[in-house]
Image (cartoon, rainbow, N blue to C red):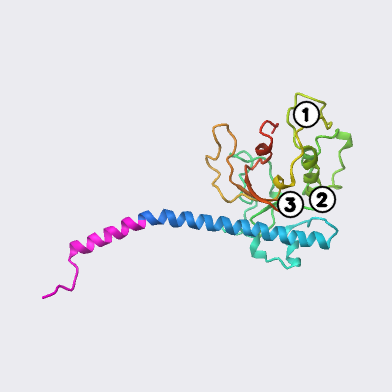
């Protein structure tokens, strides 16, 4: 007579095989899911860039003051959320390491928009609460202090546009402080590597420094010319490795 049921031993063997296969496949599934979420985030940044370009065409080439202003241009608000952001846009640090931690410097919570995962670093709003004296002095440090624009007359978009022209401090021991001296300052930055919107949700902020003590490349960016790219949080070091932080 033909046997129609598994023995206990056969059943245990089948269960064991299934568990082994699952153990092999789950890491692959997790990797695929992470890659899919990364692609979704990149698509979000591209959608933001597209909506931003429409906004600029309708507003005399100026950048919006806040990302949420893009909703008026037909942009879908859900694209403000990175799939890896478990807080759904509620984290005031926007996924960045707070000051004092690995890869963290400066308090940028003033740039946070509730419901957005992304750090918007090209606001067209000329507001001293968004673009502070410290920001002004960083982006305009090729100029003597007396020649730098007054607080409230420039914003992030202005500062980043200016930064493209002279690069960053390269060798503080050379040239004249506060003057556009090529011995002291680096080459101008390309619009392709100056980020305007950034996502910090793609890596945990523990043990993210390499042997040189610099933060590894874990930040997803969209640039002035709408190029998506990865960089360190301090992206200027990628372009000019010997510049002064």
Please tell me in which quadrant of the rendered image residue 233 appears.
top right
Residue with the mark numbered 3: 225
Of callouts 3 and 2, the N-terminal one = 2
State which mark lies toward you, 1 or 3: 3
Reading the image, the residue beneath label 1 is: 184
Q: Can residue 171 be seen in the rendering of this structure? A: yes
| Magenta highlight: main SS | helix
Residue located at (66% from left, 54% from top): 118
Q: Are marks 3 and 2 in contact (CB under 8 Å)?
A: no
In the image, residue 213 lies at what x, y percent?
A: 58, 33
Residue 84 appears anywhere in the view? no
Residue to which mark 2 is pinned: 127
Q: Is residue 25 magenta?
A: no
* Residue 7 on the magenta segment: yes
> In x, y percent, where is residue 3?
15, 72
- Magenta segment range? 1-22
The C terminus - image quarter: top right
The residue positioned farthest toward the top in the image shown: 173
Looking at the image, is 124 positioned above or below residue 147? below
**What x and y, as percent, mark residue 235?**
67, 41
On-image quarter of the N terminus: bottom left
State the separation of the CA atoms marked 3 and 2: 24 Å
Tell me the element at label 1: loop
Q: Nearer the viewer, mark 2 or mark 1?
A: 1
């Amino acid at each position: 007579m033909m046997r129609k049921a598994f023995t206990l031993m056969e059943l245990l063997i089948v269960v064991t095989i299934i568990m082994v296969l699952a153990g092999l496949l789950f890491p692959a599934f997790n990797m695929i899911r992470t890659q899919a979420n990364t692609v979704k985030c990149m698509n979000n940044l591209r959608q933001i860039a597209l909506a931003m370009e429409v906004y600029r065409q309708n507003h005399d080439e100026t950048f919006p003051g806040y990302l949420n202003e893009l909703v008026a241009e037909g942009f879908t608000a859900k694209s403000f959320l990175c799939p890896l952001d478990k807080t759904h846009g509620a984290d005031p640090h926007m996924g960045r390491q707070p000051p004092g931690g690995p890869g963290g410097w400066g308090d940028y919570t003033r740039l946070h928009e509730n419901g957005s995962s992304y750090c918007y670093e090209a606001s067209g709003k000329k507001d001293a609460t968004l673009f502070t004296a410290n920001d002004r002095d960083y982006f305009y440090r090729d100029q003597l202090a007396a020649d730098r624009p007054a607080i409230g007359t420039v914003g992030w978009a202005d500062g980043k546009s200016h930064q493209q022209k002279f690069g960053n401090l390269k060798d503080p021991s050379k040239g004249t402080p506060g003057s556009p001296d090529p011995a002291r300052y680096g080459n101008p930055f390309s619009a392709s590597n100056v980020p305007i919107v950034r996502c910090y949700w793609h890596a945990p902020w523990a043990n993210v420094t390499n042997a040189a003590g610099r933060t590894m490349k874990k930040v997803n960016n969209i640039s002035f010319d709408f190029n998506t790219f990865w960089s360190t949080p301090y992206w200027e070091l990628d372009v000019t490795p010997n510049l002064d932080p």
